[in-house]
Amino acid sequence: MATPERDSLTGYHTTGHEWDGIKELNTPIPTWWVTVFLGSCLVALLYMWLYPSFATTTGIFKGRLGWTSHGQLAEEMAAGRAAQAEWRRLLTDTPLEQVEANADLRRFAIAGGRAAFNENCAPCHGVGAGGQIGQFPALVDDDWLWGGTLPDIHQTVRYGIRSGHEETRDSMMPAFGEMLTPAEIDAIADYVLALSDSGAEARRAALPGATLFQQNCAACHGLKGEGNREMGAPRLNDAIWLYGGTKEAIRHQIANPRMGVMPAFAGKLDAETLRMLALYVHSLGGGER
């Protein structure tokens, strides 16, 4: 067998292949590369043996360690709960109104409430709790349908609004489009707009809708449109509107009212998290003492 030709420039033998005067060198793979490659193969085989890795005829090979991402998450959550156990116990044992007197406990509750709010409430009320006009109320102002004290907020969070829970808060506005004429509804809308306009106070009583409002709306919304939290009837004498403050929006709400639904979180969230949520919402700026 002939001895392979050696390339004079590199010192490597050639393979005997040549194209247009270009000769192929028989260049060996570096030893370090072979070592790393074989080591990587061994590590991969070891990983496949220790951890879930490939399908079998009966499912997935679970690995010798029995590790799962679900199990790891459960361990981390258990560790987190163990670290929070004392704070959670203290939060449960402390009346809501007294939590703010303990600065450390309040910080713990607000931090937990913010996380729970972003996960459970922000899809409707917004990340900043600014609400959505025509859909969901803002939680950062001082206008509350059912009250803005800590116990009020806590009850709303627990049982929801029109949620179907036996303890839910419920109210119903009649559809006046089935009881009043379009002209009467138009007159009431004008009067409701005047209620929120401080400049219209002098002429308000003379408006055609004044009597209609007293006859049909004052029982729930109050003689001066101040609202009734016991019934969930909103104020009408301010500039805060859930479904819009234009005359057309008000007419629509009188004729064919929209009434939102808030789910009950009791049973979905634990008692401590419900208290955290109430404290967080209360801290947003509109909470009442």
Image: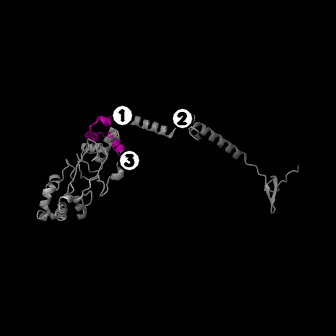
Determine contact: label 2, label 1, CB under 8 Å.
no
Q: Position of residue 193 (x, y in %)?
A: 19, 62
Q: Position of residue 158 (x, y in %)?
A: 29, 42
Q: Position of residue 80 (x, y in %)?
A: 42, 38
Residue 35 shown left or right of residue 263 in the figure:
right
Q: Which residues are magenta?
A: 86-113
Q: Which residue corresponds to mark 1?
A: 86
Within 10 Å of disc 3 (Cα), the crowding (few <14, some 14-19, many 20+) is few
Can residue 220 be seen at all in this image of the molecule? Answer: yes
Marks 2 and 1, the one that precedes in the sequence: 2
Query: Tag 2: residue type?
Result: Gly
Within 10 Å of disc 2 (Cα), the crowding (few <14, some 14-19, many 20+) is few
Within 10 Å of disc 1 (Cα), the crowding (few <14, some 14-19, many 20+) is few
Q: Nearer the viewer, residue 92 or 194?
A: 194
Quarter of the image where one finds residue 112? top left
105 drawn magenta: yes
Query: Tag 3: residue type?
Result: Glu
In this picture the colour scheme is one colour
Quarter of the image where one finds residue 76? top left
User: What residue sits 32% from the left and 56% below the top?
Assistant: 132
Dominant SS of magenta comes to helix
Q: Which residue corresponds to mark 3?
A: 119
Q: Quadrant of the C terminus?
A: top left
Query: Tag 1: residue type?
Result: Glu
* Residue 66 - label: 2
User: What residue sits 28% from the left and 52% below the top?
Assistant: 260
Marks 2 and 3, the one that precedes in the sequence: 2
